[in-house]
Image (cartoon, rainbow, N blue to C red):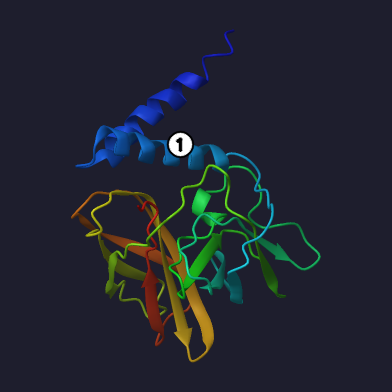
Amino acid sequence: MSSASPLIPFAATLVALAAVVSGCATTQDANQRASIQADRTLASREPLAIHGSDQDVRVARTSVISGKDGSAVVVVLRNRGTAPVNDLPIELVKRGGDPLNARPNVPYFQSHAPAIAPGAETSWVYVTKDKIGAGPVYARLGAPPATAPKASDVPKLDVSEAGSDGSEQGSSVVAKVANDTGIPQYGLDVYAVARKGDRYVAAGRASVAHLGVDESTELTLNLIGDAKGSRIQVYAPPTLFE
């Protein structure tokens, strides 16, 4: 059997990615963006490796939420520097246990932090069907991979809560995301966190495969926990930028 055959599906994926992310961009832009997505896809197939650290980004808080459908970990990240950061590896470890998200085939942005503008704070959510159980979870940040793009600016996507599922338990939220950044977004993770006072009571994640320039979409984020009567915030950090 030829050893070259497994490369054919990946080559086809790369071509498809170039078509997806092109939008109105030049061929060079489209190829560069497709290459970024291909690198991220390859990275997600391997176990997460933490090398080095970023001196400007700090973990401000971590919270674990459990429910009947699994667990969610909310990590609040703060960029204290004067430049944007992106694609930072983020490893979650429960005291005395193995990393939660370091195994192969974890979605890329479930093991890498999103883009954070200088001086900004954002919430990142990890979701698993497994019950994490009681006890703290620690987040450790590394330096971005050598193949990762370096953002010179972090464009903002327009995000709004469009409604809820109407259930008494507040088990999901409907969000609308609009892309007026001028840059097509691919593999876009959207996070929702619900708070009562200073306590996180629910969180969820959904992913948008592709959101073109001047396009919008509505998506339902299933929440772990009970969001009834809480304040819900939705985040959609960009995945592609200049």
Question: Who is closer to the viewer here, 148 or 132?
Answer: 148
- Residue ID at (52%, 89%): 198
In the rendered image, residue 192, in percent from the top left (x then y), is placed at 42, 70
Is 234 on the left or on the right of 92, as rendered?
A: left
In the rendered image, residue 96, in percent from the top left (x then y), is placed at 81, 65
Question: Who is closer to the viewer here, 111 or 239?
Answer: 239
Is 197 on the left or on the right of 70, as rendered?
A: left
Above/below status of 12 relative to 132? above
Question: Who is closer to the viewer here, 241 or 215?
Answer: 241
Tag 1: amino acid? Ala
- Residue ID at (65%, 48%): 48
Is 182 on the left or on the right of 134, as rendered?
A: left
Could you classify mark 1 by the number of other residues whose Cα lies within 10 Å: few (under 14), some (14-19), or many (20 or more)? some
Rendered image quadrant of residue 68:
bottom right
Residue 181 can be seen in this image:
yes
Rendered image quadrant of residue 139:
bottom right
- Image quadrant holding the N terminus, namely top right
Is 100 on the left or on the right of 177, as rendered?
A: right
Question: Who is closer to the viewer here, 217 or 180?
Answer: 180
